[in-house]
Image: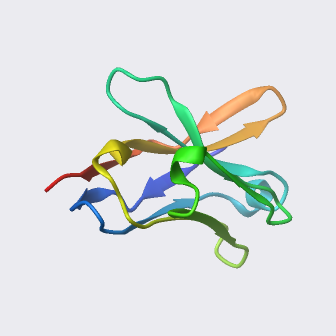
């Protein structure tokens, strides 16, 4: 069974920073690319950032230069460092991995950017 455990969300002021974490099993982490998605109320879930098993990264245009995705091979954990946060970054953030044709999701962690 694939388990993804998200954590690290919270309330932060505009311009602030947060770091999200996603822990999974070693068997998953070492083989597959990992992604972060987010979903704001009334919006579709959108891809925020992804990282391949080799460490190549990709980002949504809206977060380039502000967010950084990384992976810690020793801890089987993927991180999303979010800087210069804006109110429009407010959403539930989900860790994601695709195994074949099946998508697996973390439970989600709420990020709220507000003064």
| Left/right of residue 12 with respect to residue 77 in the rendered view | left
Residue 1 at x, y = what percent? 67, 41
> Who is closer to the viewer here, 81 or 15?
15
Horizontal and vertical percent for residue 81?
Answer: 50, 67
- Specify whether 99 is left or right of 49: right
Q: Residue furthest left?
A: 115
Picture layout, residue 41 above or below residue 1? above
Q: How many marks?
A: 0
- Residue drawn at point x = 52 percent, y = 44 percent: 106
**What sort of colour scheme is used for the picture?**
rainbow
Q: Nearer the viewer, residue 80 or 72?
A: 80
Q: Residue at x 25, y 53 (%)?
A: 113
Q: Position of residue 28 (x, y in %)?
A: 76, 53
Q: Residue at x 41, y 23 (%)?
A: 43
The quadrant holding residue 11 is bottom left
Q: Is residue 114 above or below residue 30?
A: above
Between residue 103 and residue 91, name the one nearer to us: 91
Q: Quadrant of the C terminus?
A: bottom left
**Residue 36 visible:** no
Q: Is residue 55 above or below residue 91?
A: below
State whether residue 102 appears in this view: yes
């Amino acid at each position: 069974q694939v388990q993804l455990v998200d954590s690290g969300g919270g309330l932060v002021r505009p311009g602030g920073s947060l770091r999200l974490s996603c822990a999974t099993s070693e068997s998953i982490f070492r083989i597959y690319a990992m992604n972060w998605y987010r979903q704001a109320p009334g919006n579709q879930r959108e891809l925020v950032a992804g990282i391949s098993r080799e460490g190549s990264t990709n980002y949504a245009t809206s977060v380039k230069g502000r967010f950084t995705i990384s992976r810690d091979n020793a801890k089987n954990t993927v991180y999303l460092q979010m800087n210069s946060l804006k109110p429009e970054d407010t959403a539930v953030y989900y860790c994601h991995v695709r195994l074949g044709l099946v998508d697996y999701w973390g439970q989600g962690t709420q990020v709220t950017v507000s003064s």
